[in-house]
Structure formats: structure tokens, C-alpha cells
Image (tube, grey):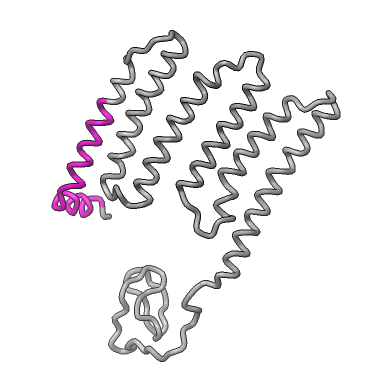
Amino acid sequence: MSYCVNCGVELDSSEKTCPLCGVEVLNPRQPYDEKAERPYPTRLDPINERINRHFIAAILSICLAFPAIICVAINLFMSGKAGWSLYVAGALAIVWVFAVPYYLNPKPSFGWMCLADIVAILLYLLLIAGMSPNHDWYLSLALPLTLLCGGIVWVTGLLIEYRLVRDFAIPAAILAGAGLLNVGIELIVELYLEGSYHLDWSFFVLIPCLAVAAIFVTIARRQSIREEIRKRIHL
């Protein structure tokens, strides 16, 4: 009987590598036997995996729909119209959009899921604005802030998903996006409150973010530095 030298798991003679950590099996007394029967299947059953994902999606949908329906029913019974319950139902609908599509789609795409999240947030804010006596803040404040934040997250996520940025370039992209987000927030808020804009506090966020991002970009372009850092932090 063999045991993995890295994690100690018990190994069968049909194992060429450890199924738990992937370390190569080297045991002269029990060489690798290609014809030996494997103790477990070589791949997961796609049908069971699909059923499990759909089951989780169904459970989450029920858990989110039940309190929304209860709140709307209570609100209608007490006051004859749906008022505060729409806030609760809308918030639960956003949670559904954020969580459930991941389990319904066997190969979820970050780009489409992020766009759905942005649209859900915009619709929820539109609901709040429609139920408020003063709703001019939606077009001039809520809409641009949501599009700015969602757009930066969407672009950064796509760059990472399609591996246009990788390794140490990932924190550089995140930091640059965070700095630009703060500048955009200040500009939008200043335009909404004062009708004009001038950059102030966002510079104190943008400059350090860009400086640290430049450091990560430099590291990403130097292989020797990357290897040395990986050795130091055991990556």
C-alpha cells in the first residue's frame, strides 16, 4: 500500500498521481499499474451535477420568494396596497439575480451575470425613485453612479476572465479601477450638489492607487522578481 509523500492519503496501485493534491506517486515496491481497477470513477457524473445545481437554485428561489410573498400579503391586508413590501420584494429579487443564475447556468459567464446584476440594481433604484416624492436624484445621481461602478467592475472582471491581465497585473487593474472610481464618484456628486465639478479628495485616493498599481505592473513584467516573490510567500 502506498501513501502520498505530500498529504499522506492512501493510494491505490492504479494511481499515477495523488487524487487529492496531484503529487506524482513514486513507489518502487508498488509500481503504477495501468490495468488495475480504479477505486472511483475518472469523471463526475454530469447528470447528477446538473441535478444538484438545479436543486440548489430551486431551494434558493423558494427561500427568497416566500418572505417576499408574505410581506406583500401582509402589506395588502393591513393597508390595502403594496407599499413598504415592495422594497423588501425588490431587495430579495436582487439577491435572486445575484445568486441563482450561477446555479442555473452550467457555464456561467461573468460578463452576462455582471450585466444582469447592474440592470437589477438600476431597476430596484428606479422602484425606490418611483415611490419617493422627489425622484430627480435617480437620473442625475443614482444612474450615473451605478453605471460607473458597474462598468468598472464589468471591464475589470472581463480582463481577468479572458486572461488579458494575469498574475500581479490583476491587483494593478483593481487598484487603477478603484482610483478612477473615486474620481468619478466625486465628479458625479459635485455635479449633483453644486452643478459644477472640481477634483479634491479623490486625488488623495487616485495617486496612491496608481502608484501601487505601477509597482505591481513592474513586478508583472519582471519574471525574476515574480519568482522571488513566489518563493518568499510560498506561492
Instruction: Give above or below for 104 relative to 39.
Output: above
State the image coordinates of residue 164 (x, y, percent, origin top left): 30, 49
- Image point 53% across, 40% down: which residue? 117
Point out the image quarter for the N terminus.
bottom left
- Left or right? Give the position of 52 relative to 139: right
Image quadrant of residue 8? bottom left
Q: Residue 130 occupies which quadrant of the picture?
A: top right
Compared across the picture, whether 108 is left or right of 68 comes to left
Q: Position of residue 87 (x, y in %)?
A: 67, 29
> Left or right: 157 with respect to 140?
left
> Which percent across, then down, holds residue 231?
21, 54
**Residue 217: percent from left, percent from top:** 21, 41
Q: Nearer the viewer, residue 23 or 8?
A: 23
What residue is rendered at 69% in x and 35% in y?
Answer: 89
Vertical position of residue 118 compared to residue 55: above or below: above
Residue lying at 43% horizontally and 30% vertically, measured from the top left: 148
Residue extending farthest to the top is: 194
On whether residue 212 falls in the magenta region, the answer is yes
Q: In which quarter of the image is residue 206?
A: top left
- The magenta segment is 207-233
